[in-house]
Image (tube, helix red, strand yellow):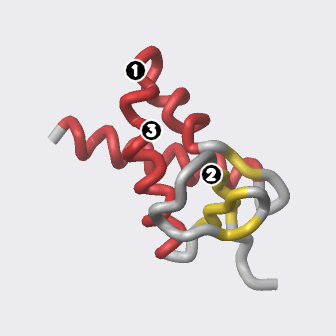
């Protein structure tokens, strides 16, 4: 149960930071993990990456590497970008 609560918080924090930064700026999954994880943020990184791709699958964010959209399973650093609404 605590793990789910942590993942819900991580999901909410990724969305909060992404929306705050807008479609012109990105965030690293570690930004959200550090924000909610304190000294143990590194333990949240696998979940942060997975949640980022889940959000991308829902059309909420883009997950990029070197500015290009990437698919789950990509290795290396990724960035998360808010998708602004139509218009």
Q: Which residue is mark 1?
A: 40
Q: What residue sits 43% from the left and 65% below the top?
A: 54
Q: What residue sits 59% from the left and 48% below the top?
A: 76
The answer to whether mark 1 and mark 2 are in CB contact below 8 A is no
Task: Name the residue nearer the viewer: 1 or 53.
Answer: 53
Toward the front, the furthest residue is: 75
At mark 2, the secondary structure is loop
Sequence-wise, the earlier of marks 2 and 3 is 3
Q: Which residue is mark 3?
A: 45
Q: Nearer the viewer, mark 1 or mark 2?
A: 2
Which of the 4 quarters of the picture holds residue 43? top left
Q: What residue sits 43% from the left and 43% below the top?
A: 10
Q: Circle 2: is it few (<14), some (14-19), or many (20+) Cα within 10 Å?
A: many
Q: Is residue 25 left or right of residue 18?
A: right
Q: Quadrant of the N terminus?
A: top left
The answer to whether mark 1 and mark 3 are in CB contact below 8 A is no
Q: CA distance from mark 1 to mark 2?
A: 20 Å
Which of the 4 quarters of the picture holds residue 51? bottom left
| Residue 86: % across, % down | 75, 84
Question: Which dot marks residue 78?
Answer: 2
Q: Circle 3: is it few (<14), some (14-19), or many (20+) Cα within 10 Å?
A: some
At mark 3, the secondary structure is helix
**Image vertical order of residue 28 relative to residue 52, above or below:** above
């Amino acid at each position: 149960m605590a793990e789910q609560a942590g993942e819900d918080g991580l999901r909410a924090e990724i969305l909060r930071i992404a929306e705050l930064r807008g479609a012109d700026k990105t965030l690293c999954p570690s930004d959200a993990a550090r924000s909610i994880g304190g000294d143990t943020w590194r333990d949240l990184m696998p979940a942060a990456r997975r949640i980022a791709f889940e959000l991308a699958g829902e059309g909420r964010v883009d997950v990029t590497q070197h500015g290009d959209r990437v698919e789950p399973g990509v290795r290396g650093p990724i960035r998360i970008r808010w998708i602004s609404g139509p218009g």
